[in-house]
Amino acid sequence: MLDGLVITRRFDTPTWLLALVFLAGIAAGLAMATALLVAIGVPASALFNEVIGEAFMTASGLAQTLTFATPLICVGLSAAVALRLRFWNIGIEGQLWLGALGATAVALGDVGPEATRLPLMLVAAALAGAAWIALPLVLKLRLGVSEVISTLLLGSIAFLFAQHLLFGAWRDPATGFPISLAFDASERLAALGFGRTHLGLPIALAAALLVWFLVDVTRLGFYGRAVGENIEAARAAGVPVIAVTCAFVLLSGALSGLAGGLIVAGTEHRMSLTLGAGYTFSGIVIAFLGRFRPLATVVVAVIIGGVFTASDVFKVFYGISEAVVVLLQGLVLFGVLVAQFFGAYRISRANWGASA
Amino acid sequence: MSGFLVGWLAAIPAYAAPLLLAALGLILSERAGVLNLSAEGVMAIGAMTGAAVVLSGIAPTLGILAGVAAGAGLSLVFAIVVVVFRGDQTLAGLTTVAVGIGLAGVLGRDYVQKPFAGIERFGADAAPATGAFERFFLQQDPLILVTLVLVVAVWWFLERTRAGLQLRAVGEDPGTADVAGVDVQMVRIAAVVAGGALCGLSGAYLSVAASHVWVEGMIAGRGWIAVALVIFARWDARRALLGALIFGAAEALGPRLQAVGAPVPTYLMMMLPYALTLAVLVLSSLVGRRGTDEPAALGSIYLRQDKS
């Protein structure tokens, strides 16, 4: 039925076509999202005011957007770094949980002198995140186990581990809720004096610069591109494939762990069970829309942060569930997925009968 | 002790059935070569739709059917994106999860946390049971029997019918199936949609039969367990039944132990299904590289003119 058209891969898609289908996909996704929001009762004019006006043009809204964007930058970078090697890190949330737990362990255990407490917390977060992706990495390299499933499974295990601690040993005895004790002042990232933004924002930006330098400037990045394009060719050309893969994937885990550390040290100031939900998908969306480029990832992360801010407004004024955030991201990604087909393939009329 | 044991065993089917239904759906899709991560979202839309229909005053049976239809509908979108538009199956699956959870949350805002009379257990209005078998049986519901029938039906369809053979051929070697006259794209779309119907049924079971209420986040990771269960079962419906019972038993054990006051690390025990699946993954790749039961064309994009 669907064989009336001949579909052939384009080996060299012109840049203008790539850009065109990409933008068309985003536009289609946004159109679907707009139609849906209007259908459930948000006036179209309010939509524009809420998203653009409230999330980016007011000081309080912009501060909120940048606060949301801080961990989003890290998870977006995490997904981008791994996807450059076509390594699907679907366990971003798991590494984020481990990062948050690592930072919390340092804070609650009062490890080291107060002066080095915060740096130590963030290092612990990054190391915990990297450690959590190490097993899927080893399984993939040694046994060929699909990282899609193993990172996913370890993500669920990490969340259960967080629940185990917060319903047990780490629970703040003063409350009935699964939250840890609040951190001391020396264990909190300093506020920037602009809404709830904190030192995590410059740290995330520095991480983006570092990742950009690593993957776009250095020899490691060059090798990474070779491995991502064609692993067999890279191996034949003498690229140290194993070492490069380890470096990229562990970096991805560390960035997700850092996101968890920044959330507990910068925004929450304690460990909780609500701080990590939804970051895997957001990270992948951000990486994908940022075309796996570190600096573009920052821009997309801020825009997605704006969607989070706007969703708070939708919730308060129109009673719309915060699920709208994940829905908007999903619709835009569907739009791009479909649109990319027209960039990746050439479509022409079939004539199977005559040629076969 | 025997009281605890019967209570535990009686609770297992209600935990196992939704996992099993979703896993059967994913098996249909993946045996046709379409890697399917979408269960969590498809179940969410099924659960919400089922509850919304019943809350609108329509019979629970029709609520279940509405959940099935909603699951099939969302899966049709996923199928079109990956089969017709050749979208990346991993990414499209994750996106379907997002859209399913998002739609359920946004469209279901008027139905949250409103209890309703759904499908009852057999023992709902019977006298308290005395015998162990009776106590077990009265804890079950009609959909658990339907689930058992569906296990047999899916296995029989895949292994004993011509259409099932075509479906498996498409998942193993789409190029050869195409030459043999099988419409690869239509088979894949049909398999994904049928699988989505089963995932929708699984979601509707959770709201209409198991809880009689719908809340956001109700699926709570069961869709991901189903994805794991399919690998655990190595894409075989019979082993999926066995796996679902093991996973369900692990899930049911924590609450039962708590009910009798035993101190148990509930959350560590809930890791069991995931750890088991990881172990199965590792073992199957140790035995035969890449696990010989995995459909050979799983996750690949089929273009007729590609040489394989």
Image (cartoon, coloured by chain):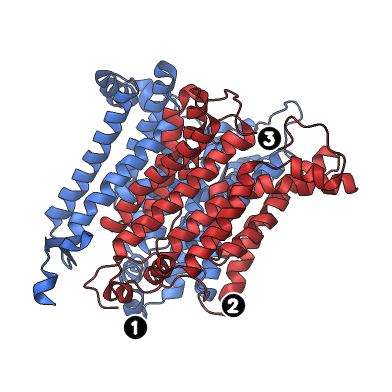
Q: Is residue A10 left or right of residue B89?
A: left
The quarter of the picture where the C terminus of chain B appears is bottom left
Mark whose residue sits in front, 2 or 1: 2
> Can residue A210 be spotted in the picture?
no
Residue B77 sits above or below residue B166 on the image: above
Q: Identify which residue is drawn at 75% across, 26% down.
A: A174
Report whether mark 3 lies on the same chain as mark 2: no
Q: Are marks 2 and 1 on the same chain?
A: no
Nearer to us in this view, B18 or A278: B18
For this rendering, which residue is in front, A156 or B3?
A: B3
Picture coordinates of residue B154, whole percent (x, y): 52, 60
At mark 1, the secondary structure is helix
Q: Quadrant of residue A237 in the image?
A: bottom left
Q: Residue at x 43, y 39 (%)?
A: A70
The colour with which the image depicts chain B is red
**Identity, as a three-letter code, of the amino acid under mark 3:** Ser
- Which label sits on residue B286? 2
The chain that hosts pointer 3 is A
**Disc 1: which residue:** A236
Query: Residues under labels 2 and 1: Cα distance?
Result: 26 Å
Q: Is residue B254 left or right of residue B92?
A: right
Instruction: Using the rendered view, name the quadrant where residue B89 is placed.
Output: bottom left
Per the image, the residue denoted by label 3 is A180
Query: Which chain did the image draw in blue?
Result: A
